Image: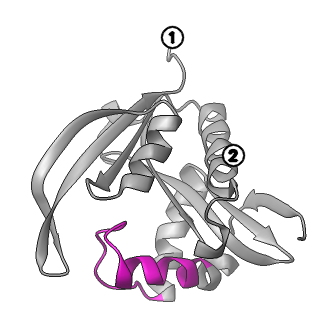
């Protein structure tokens, strides 16, 4: 197998990233997104993240096989400037290879370097793999919102998990 490399995402990666994201939207409750964004809209989202936080891709032979990024929690509220929500998606062919862990560690390190203190993730309560992954990375459940998301004609509970990555003092 070729070597996996990690780098910062660019807007030119949007198409490959959406190819990974699309099956999660269309076939799972891993994301509560209902519609696949257009390339143009996704590039706008990516641009904001790239400028302010961190957006990392993993690739093999110039093919993106996974990505991770963070968004500010309540971006318009200055009091939350040290708090981010993380997202991570990988090509299912790489499940169980450690790719998700490597992507996560890369993202967390970048967020620490820019002064982020609190990391959060929200996931459907039925996402056992995501729950275990976050738990393994020292996240704890800080809240559960019953019947909070509606997808595939059913209600889904949403869990919020959190981790403090460094002191802000």
Asked if residue 40 lies left or right of residue 74, the reply is: right
Is residue 20 on the magenta stretch?
yes
Nearest to N terminus: mark 2 or mark 1: 2
Name the residue carrying label 2.
106
Asked if residue 131 lies left or right of residue 153, the reply is: right
Q: Residue at x 53, y 35 (%)?
A: 137
Q: Residue at x 78, y 58 (%)?
A: 6
The stretch of residues the image draws in magenta is: 17-38
Residue 136 location (% of width, % of height): 51, 36
Q: Residue at x 66, y 52 (%)?
A: 103
Q: Which quadrant, please, contains the N terminus?
A: bottom right
Residue 82 location (% of width, % of height): 44, 32
What is the count of numbered marks? 2
According to the image, what is the colour scheme of the structure? one colour
Dot 2, crowdedness within 10 Å: few (<14), some or many (≥20)?
many
Camera-nearest residue between 49 and 161:
161
> What is the quadrant of residue 94 in the picture?
bottom right
Is residue 90 on the magenta stretch?
no
> What is the quadrant of residue 58 in the picture?
bottom right
Name the residue carrying label 1.
169
Asked if residue 66 lies left or right of residue 162, the reply is: right
Q: Residue at x 61, y 47 (%)?
A: 104
Mark toward the viewer: 2 or 1: 2
Q: Is residue 58 above or below residue 112?
A: below
Cα distance between the residues tagged 2 and 1: 23 Å
As helix, strand or loop, the secondary structure at mark 2 comes to: helix
Dot 1, crowdedness within 10 Å: few (<14), some or many (≥20)?
few
Residue 44 location (% of width, % of height): 48, 74
As helix, strand or loop, the secondary structure at mark 1 comes to: loop
> Is disc 2 in contact with disc 1, using a CB cutoff of under 8 Å?
no
- Which label was assigned to residue 115? none
Report the residue that reaches farthest toward the top.
169
């Amino acid at each position: 197998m070729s070597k996996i490399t990690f780098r910062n995402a660019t807007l030119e990666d949007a198409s490959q990233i959406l190819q990974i994201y699309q099956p999660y939207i269309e076939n799972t409750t891993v994301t509560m997104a209902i519609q696949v964004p257009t390339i143009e809209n996704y590039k706008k989202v990516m641009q904001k993240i790239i400028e302010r936080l961190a957006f990392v891709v993993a690739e093999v032979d110039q093919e993106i096989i996974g990505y991770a990024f963070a968004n500010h929690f309540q971006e318009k509220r200055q009091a939350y400037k040290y708090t981010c929500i993380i997202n991570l998606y990988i090509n299912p062919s790489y499940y169980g290879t450690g790719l998700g862990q490597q992507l996560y560690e890369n993202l967390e390190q970048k967020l620490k370097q820019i002064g982020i203190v609190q990391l959060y993730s929200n996931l459907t309560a039925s996402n056992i793999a995501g729950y275990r992954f976050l738990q393994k990375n020292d996240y704890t459940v800080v809240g559960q919102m019953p019947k909070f998301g509606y997808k595939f004609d059913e209600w889904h509970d949403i869990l919020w998990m959190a981790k403090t990555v460094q002191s802000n003092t």
